Amino acid sequence: MAQDNLTAVLYKINDIRLEQRPIPEPQDNEVLLQMACVGICGSDVHYWVHGRCADFILKSPMIMGHEASGTVAKVGKNVKHLKPGDRVAVEPGVPCRLCRYCKEGRYNLCYDMVFCATPPVHGNLTRYYTHAADFCFKIPDHVTLEEAALLEPLSVGVHACKRAGVTLGSTVLITGAGPIGLVTL
């Protein structure tokens, strides 16, 4: 494995630097991913331009990115469902798995969610990145890594449509031309 781990690090407003960072080792329940595609989300732009996104404020350097796909390079000792070479989409939010919301299957509401590129947690706009293996999903051969990186924003759009009761033939207004808006079309 190459020792090159070029990483996009946001230091402060309008100060993104490309740096070499150490390649991390996966913990027992993690995988090391060689990142293939990472989208630029509206939240990334907010951190870059404003130093914050909603209540999350950039207080120290942070690796950007959370809309991602990659190839498994290494697995932690407890990981059985993935192996090196598997192509995966990354679900960027990792919940506690223990709270009421997690147990009800609504882990997106978990108060203890750890979310990529949300201070103080680093993102995955880097060549190598470790992530919880159970939040990395194998993609079929016919799905490209570029398409897989769009699964997270697509899931946001699908969730919004379900919540709003949108069905085939509904008339809707989509505001925003970022990844979520575009894949929701």
Image: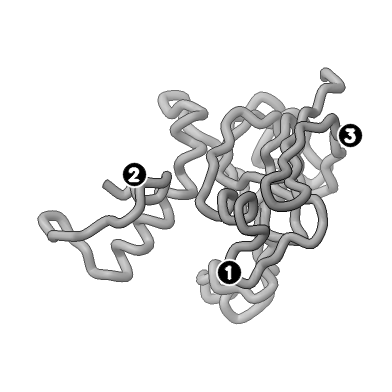
Q: CA distance from mark 3 to mark 1?
A: 30 Å
The colour scheme is one colour
Front residue of this view, candidates 36 and 97: 36
Please report the residue visible at 58 percent of the width from the left and 40 percent of the height from the top: 68
In the depicted view, which residue is nearer to us: 116 or 20? 20
The quarter of the rendered structure image containing the N terminus is top right
Look at the numbered disc 2 and give the secondary structure of its residue. helix
Q: Badge 2 is on which residue?
A: 182
User: The disc labelled 2 sits on which kind of residue?
Assistant: Leu
* Horizontal and vertical percent position of residue 120: 77, 60
Residue under label 3, please give it: 22
Report the residue at 64% width, 50% height from top.
48
Q: Which residue is mark 1?
A: 54
**Whether residue 100 is situated above or below residue 28 in the rendered picture:** below
Q: What amino acid is labelled 3 in the image? A: Pro
Q: Is residue 154 above or below residue 115?
A: above
| Element under disc 3 | loop
Question: How far separated are the C-alphas under marks 2 and 1?
Answer: 22 Å
Residue type at the position of mark 1: Ala
Dot 1 lies on which element? loop
User: Camera-side residue: 177 or 109?
Assistant: 177
Q: Residue furthest bottom?
A: 100
